[in-house]
Image (cartoon, rainbow, N blue to C red):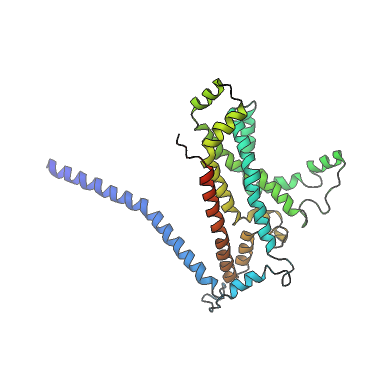
Amino acid sequence: MLEKKKSKGIKGVIRRRRIFIFVMLAWPVLRLLLEWYLNFDIIWMAFRDYTIDIINGDFVGLDNFKGIFNLFDPSRNTMPEYYALLHCAQLMLLVIFVNAPISLAFAYLLYLKVKGYKVLRYALYIPVITSAVVLVLAYRQVFQPDGPINYLYNMLGWEWPSGGFFSAENAWGSIIVFSIWTGFSTNIIYFLSCMRRVPDSYVEAAKIDGASEPKIFFSIILPLASPTICTMISLGIAGVFSWALPSLLFVPQNSGGYNVGTMGLSILNFTTGRHYGLAAAYGILVTLVACPIMIGIRKLSHKLEEAVEY
């Protein structure tokens, strides 16, 4: 009787273990199959005249790709698509030379627990926990003619921009400022977490030797945090190729134009316009552009970062 109970107990454990393994593997396997299906489906659509009304479009060869390349020809298009490439390049420089340094600076201030760091922490985390729509509304209100920026302009004797900050000629600059404000908050969380993993003995030994705070930052904190920094920069640059939401939230009436266009926004516009073949072709071209850039960045980051285990 006891042996039967033990046998049933062992079988129950094995059954529960098998169920657990099946549940744990089901989602990643299903996701992998779904991603492969979507990738092949995009390739299939890129060579066909595919819309929502034409489910099985005719095979058109490279016509969709030719249509995308024609968008970059100024003689055929009053709003050449190369403005989208230019904006994406600007966003990449923003990620590397603006957001990353600002994130590191503020993360280090929080790491040092400077005076008022709790208030600073809450202020920096607001963009992370607040809806993007709410942030846009608050940001637009600040730059309205009756907002605080207008009073600052009047105090300094500056002239208010023609058409306001969100007109066609000024919209992209306003979006860049918004991206700087909201773009470094998430990085701060990761950078601060990484800095707090640095052994206190390293910092204490440096202080005993008379090292200043800048010396500690550049000689100890920055090298140990370099893997996280490189990873966050890589993720930021990867996100540039699908960047579209701020343009849609700020100036939806001009979102398809050269003034706020990006490659991700162009794909979205093709999709909402039911030009799925063009959207698929554009997506493949963006992938062909993005992959070498990301591989190059990863190789460069591996050379720059120090392989440190702590």
Is residue 129 at all visible to an observer of this figure?
no
Whether 252 is drawn above or below 3: the answer is below
Quadrant containing the C terminus is: top left
Question: Residue 50 sits in which quadrant?
Answer: bottom right
In the rendered image, residue 108, in percent from the top left (x then y), is placed at 60, 33
- The residue shown at (44%, 63%) is 36
- The residue shown at (64%, 39%) is 102
In the rendered image, residue 131, in percent from the top left (x then y), is placed at 62, 46
Whether 272 is drawn above or below 16: the answer is below
In the rendered image, residue 70, in percent from the top left (x then y), is placed at 66, 71
Return the residue nearer the eye: 286 or 264.
286
Return the residue nearer the eye: 53 or 181.
181
Furthest toward the right, the residue is 157
Task: Count every numbered label the image shows and give the total.
Answer: 0
Return the residue nearer the eye: 249 or 280.
280
In the rendered image, residue 3, in percent from the top left (x then y), is placed at 13, 42
Furthest toward the left, the residue is 1
- The residue shown at (63%, 54%) is 245
Q: Left or right? Give the position of 125 relative to 170.
A: left
Quadrant containing the N terminus is: top left
Question: Residue 241 sits in which quadrant?
Answer: bottom right
- The residue shown at (52%, 36%) is 224
Is residue 280 at all visible to an observer of this figure?
yes
Furthest toward the front, the residue is 303
